[in-house]
Amino acid sequence: MRGSGPLASLLLETDISDILINGPEDIWVDRGGRLEKTDLSFDDHQHLLRFLNRILAQQGKTIDHASPIVDAKLEDGSRLHALMPPLCKNGPIVSIRRFKNHNCDLEALVERQFMSPVMLELLRVAVAGGVNIIFSGGAASGKTTLMNALSGFIPAGERIVTIEESAELKLVHPHVVSLEGRESNCEGEGGIGLPDLLRAALRMRADRIMIGEIRGAEVFDMLQAMNVGHDGSMATVHANSPEDAIRRLEALAMIHGNSFSLDFVQTLIGSAVQLVVQLTRCGDGSRYVESIAQVNNHDITSA
């Protein structure tokens, strides 16, 4: 009635990063970077739906035929995304992304060959010196992990505002203000998006602004912030290379600002972004920093 049902044991394991439910009898986990099918199951579709609605009710949300897609958070901070029929024929589909609460040790990352000592020193100098950085890579490639770890190099006297759809960043810094977006209700009202939070952050005397992921209209406010006094700001973007990251920022800016020319957008990006850190996730689950590239008047060169 009050617990996590068949997922209780999985939520206690610290090496599981994702719990994937493909219907009541098909539960998988990502353990140490590898997908594994478990022998756990819910009794039936109704059992799984009761589990979902118990979690959602605590946040004033529900999942039903009228609202078949929902996002929520578990008590430990894990992010839950769920869909139900008619969008999926085999029963409710649930994805739970878990986040480690402890601070990441940069030296441990070097020992695990996540990055080289030279890369670590370069990023230390860049972060401490107020360089604007974009972290690029695929899903679960370590972008948020690296952002959290590098925050320890930000001078203690600076004020940081983080902006996310679902709070994942846990920065190693004494002065952090965390802002989190809010979805619209079933009537389509009350939603607060990242652009709204960014505009609020610009009035909060932030020295640096960090965005969990750029994927919409917030791209303009972020680029403007990087250009007008918020040096050392950081953000992540999904892309396969530093060049792709810049192209993606261009595309987002053109989609959400169709009155601007491509030359203007390129100039804005070229003056705002100084470094692109590319991360990669291998087939065996290992992750590493593939490259660090410098943006110089919109040209990408290896740093």
Image: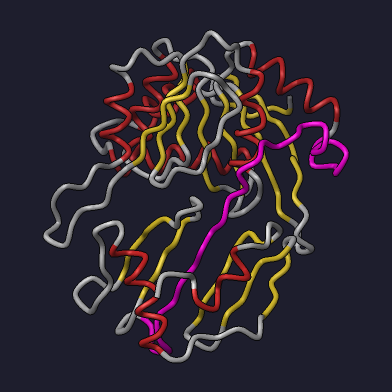
Q: Is 54 included in the stretch rendered in magenta?
A: no
Q: Residue 7 location, x and y as percent?
A: 55, 73
Q: Residue at x 54, y 18 (%)?
A: 232
Residue 288 visible within the image = yes
Q: Residue at x 55, y 86 (%)?
A: 41
Q: Is 104 included in the stretch rendered in magenta?
A: yes
Tell me if residue 175 comes above or below residue 163 in the rendering. Answer: above
Quadrant including the N terminus: bottom left
In this image, 39 relative to 168: left or right? Answer: right
Magenta stretch, main secondary structure class: loop
Tell me if residue 262 comes above or below residue 231 in the rendering. Answer: below
- Over which residues does the magenta segment extend? 88-115
Quarter holding residue 282: bottom right
Quarter holding residue 119: top right
The residue nearer to you, when weighing 49 against 128, is: 49
- Colour theme: secondary structure
